[in-house]
Amino acid sequence: MSEPGFEEWVAARGPRLLRVAWLLTGDAHLAEDLLQTVLARIWPKWPRIAGENPEAYARKALVHTHASWWRRRWRGELPHGELPDLAGPDDPFAEVDLEQALAAAIRALPVRQRAVVVLRYFEDLSVAETAEVLRCSEGTVKSQASKALHSLRDRLPAAVAADGGGLGD
C-alpha cells in the first residue's frame, strides 16, 4: 500500500520525470530503470517531502542517481553512428532526424554538462535552481552550459548550427 497521494503524484508527474530520465540516459529502458529506482527511494520519504516540492526532490534524485550509475559503468567503448546527410526541404523525416541528432549530441556530452543542459534548457530551471540541484556554484553552471552549447553546436548538422538551432537563445 502506498502513501496517500504518492500514486496520484506519480501518475501526474511521472511522464515529465521520465522525460528527464530519458534525456539524462539517452535510452528508454535505462530511463525507466532510473525513474523506478528514484521513485522507490522517494516512496518511504513521501510523508516528509510531499508538503515541500516533491518534483524538485525527484529531479535532483534523478540527476544524482544517474551520475552515480555513470561513474560505475565501464566506458571503454562508445559506439556511434554517422550522422545522416542534411535533409531536403521536402523531407518528412527532417524533424525526427534533427531530434535524433540532438539526442545523440546530448548523450555525447560529459555527465555534468548533460545534466546542466537537461535542467537549464529542457526543464527550464534558472541558473540558481540548477546550481542547487547539482550542488555547485552558479559560475560552474554557467561555464558548463557554455561548454555544452559550444560542443552541441559543433556536433549538430551544419544547417542547424548555422541557424543556432535555438541553442542558448
Image (cartoon, rainbow, N blue to C red):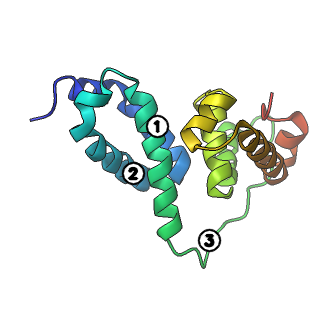
Q: CA distance from mark 3 to mark 1?
A: 28 Å
Q: Is residue 86 left or right of residue 40?
A: right
Name the residue tied to disc 2: 34
Residue type, numbered disc 2: Leu
Q: How packed is label 3: few (under 14 Cα within 10 Å), some, or many (20 or more)?
A: few
The numbered mark, 2 or 1, whose residue comes first in the sequence reads 2
Asked if residue 4 shows in the view, the reply is yes
- Disc 2 secondary structure class: helix
Closer-to-camera residue (8/57): 57
- Disc 1 secondary structure class: helix
Q: Is residue 30 left or right of residue 118?
A: left
Instruction: Please give the label number shown on residue 40.
Output: none
* Residue 66 image offset from top left, x and y in percent: 48, 54
Residue visible at 80% across and 49% down in the picture: 147
Q: Which of pointers 3 and 1 indicates the residue nearer the eye?
A: 1
Residue visible at 61% across and 77% down in the picture: 77
Closer-to-camera residue (114/44): 44
Q: Which of pointers 2 and 3 indicates the residue nearer the eye?
A: 2
